[in-house]
Amino acid sequence: MPLHLIKLCVGVDTVRELVGYMRQRGRAAEKRGQPPRHAHVTRMTPTRGRDLVDGGSLYWVVRGQIAARQRLVEIAPFVDAEGVSRCRLWVDAQVVKVVPRPMRPFQGWRYLRDEDAPPDLTTAGADIALMPEAMRRELGQLGLL
């Protein structure tokens, strides 16, 4: 059974902004002659990396709600120029919207068991997937989604 990570998406107000940011980073990488991959750099390296890349995703908390996920492709520890150990969480380019769920702020990342992960919007039903993000967010805050 896959294991996931959950992380706050700081500086982004909507999933649409997150997708735009990922596209922008991909285009910048291509201009440098690199593949359009995206990595999120974190201070700590997950100890359960093998479980994470075996079908796991990085779930993004956007404005207090779990809102989207990206499949984890690779976990690559490294040491930066100042000698500090860090980790690149390489994710798939596709950002998948999930049924919104409230999440309190936290530092770093947390493990998320597969059975606790919110379902993708595409599997939750067409009516929910067709709602504007702001409406889904508000209904989620009210506990109606």
Image (cartoon, helix red, strand yellow):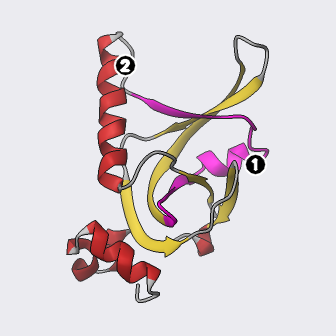
Mark 2 lies on a secondary structure that is: helix
The N terminus, quarter of image: bottom right
Q: Mark 2 and 1 residues: CB-CB less than 8 Å, in contact?
A: no
**Around disc 1, counting alpha carbons within 10 Å, would you say few (fewer than 14), some (14 to 19), or many (20 or more)?**
few
Rendered image quadrant of residue 29: top left
Q: Which residues are magenta?
A: 37-65
Rendered view: 59 above or below 77 = below
Bin the neighbour count of mark 2 within 10 Å (Cα to Cα): few under 14, some 14-19, many 20 and up: some
Question: Residue 97 at what x, y percent from top left?
Answer: 36, 61
Say what secondary structure mark 1 lies in.
loop
* Residue under label 1: 48
On the question of residue 15 being in view, the answer is yes
Q: Position of residue 98 (x, y in %)?
A: 41, 67
Left or right: 123 with respect to 143? left
User: Which residue matches tag 2?
Assistant: 29
- Residue 60 among magenta residues: yes
**Which amino acid is tagged 1?**
Arg
Of the 4 image quadrants, the one containing the C terminus is bottom left
The CA span between labels 2 and 1 is 29 Å
Q: Mark 2: which amino acid?
A: Ala
**Residue depicted at 29% across the width and 80% down the height:** 125
